[in-house]
Amino acid sequence: MDVRARCWSLVLVGSVLLGGCASTPSDQPSPLLRDAAFAPPTEPVDPRQALTLSPAMREFAAGDMARQIRAKGPRDGLIEALYAREWLQLEYDSERTRTAAEAFEARRGNCMSLVLMTAAFARHMGLNLRFNSVTLDESWTRANGMFFVAGHVNISVGRPSVPGETALFDSLGLLTIDFLPPRLLRGQRSYAIDEATLLAMFANNRAAEELTEGRLDQAYWWARAGVQTDPRWLASYNTLAVIYRRRGLLDAAEATLRAVLEREPQNLQAMSNLVLVLGDLGRPQQAAELARQLAQIQPVPPYAYFDQGVEAMRQGQYRSARELFSKEIARAAYVSEFHFWLALANYGLGDLGGARGEIAKALENSATHRERELYGAKLAWLNEQRRAALPPGGRLVRDTGP
């Protein structure tokens, strides 16, 4: 199984906050919803389908998986069948949050998708399971002018249920499956979440991805599904507010963000979004005051050093750019884009070895198949440049610039 160092499961749009608490799906529409402002969905929007087994998955469960279960027992056999290298050959890919069936068919997915696939098989085999949200250092990325903050989930699988048994989780022999290297999880805390919260997270991921692709109406219906699936999980409301702002529903965006802040007065993502909305509404004084409060909590916003570095690159100030990109990497080493731009700065300084090293790190931290192809090609080109710089039959003693 090819698992990269950065394996975030929850792609949350518009500076939303990962959180979660157990709840049950709500049949009552939230007063914050604005269905009439959006075209009907063009494809089904049902988070419950994320845990459905496909015919191909059932065939796998009856064949290869069943053989492993007979050899190693239900829990260990399932894990062996899903994640041993000789079986599915799964690849980590964060480009899209896939359902269990989609992840199985594509043989790839992000952590959310792999948790869903594992859960679907575990339920099919009658195994006990528990979903976990893992508290990691807050991690940011940016795409199409929007900020994303990511969280992480994993799954614990136990022995089969016994009819009529009322057992505590600790007595069920739970084994936690995680797609992050153990060193990144050392000392991290996790807490159990229920299925409704997990599916709300899935819906919110889908909303984020649709919004990134410019499909605003479809994004709304997925965010709406997240709100309905777990009304107490605030990330969906934050995403909903971003969608409202993009549609020009500024009053609805403000009301939604204030509902978040009523629950969490120092929710940085809701505060950031509300600053923008207040500015759009022509209330600059309120926006400025909220921005001052935000700056006291978060003095240097995400991507601040990176943006300054890009501007320095445009002006040909490669040494300054290198320092700024290094500062951004010091607080967010998981972002492949930062390493790529540091490689460009090194190349501009004539530091071919440094450029090659940073491209290698960009490749290591890449989260999608497309990124891995791009950075792999760049690294191959730099390696060619290095070979071309070698003296005939000789050894390059120094290939770095000033």
Image (spheres, rainbow, N blue to C red):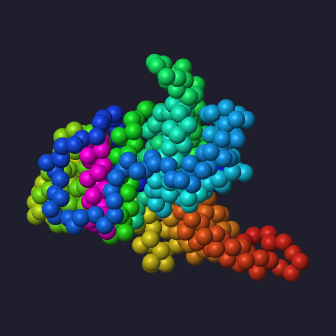
Could you say which quadrant of the image residue 186 lies in?
top right
- Residue 64: tell me if it is visible: yes
281 vs 3, left or right, is left
Could you say which quadrant of the image residue 283 lies in?
bottom left
Residue depicted at x 45% and y 47%: 51
Answer whether residue 228 is magenta in the image.
yes
Q: Which contiguous range is marked in magenta?
A: 215-231
Whole-percent x, y for residue 342 in the image: 55, 66
Residue depicted at x 79% and y 69%: 397
Whole-percent x, y for residue 256 in the image: 18, 50
Give the residue at the far right of this rendering: 393
Residue depicted at x 53% and y 53%: 55
320 vs 38, left or right, is right
- In this view, the residue in front, 11 or 139, is 11
In the picture, which quadrant includes the C terminus?
A: bottom right
Vertical relation: 153 (above or below) 308:
above
Whole-percent x, y for residue 213 in the image: 37, 69
Could you say which quadrant of the image residue 264 lies in?
top left
Whole-percent x, y for residue 354 in the image: 64, 66
236 vs 65, left or right, is left
* Number of marks in picture: 0
Answer whether residue 299 is magenta in the image.
no
- In this view, the residue in front, 316 or 208, is 208
Vertical relation: 124 (above or below) 38:
above
- Residue 239: tell me if it is visible: no
- In this view, the residue in front, 317 or 28, is 28
Q: What kind of secondary structure does the magenta stretch mostly adopt?
A: helix
Residue depicted at x 63% and y 33%: 74
- In this view, the residue in front, 159 or 124, is 124
68 vs 261, left or right, is right
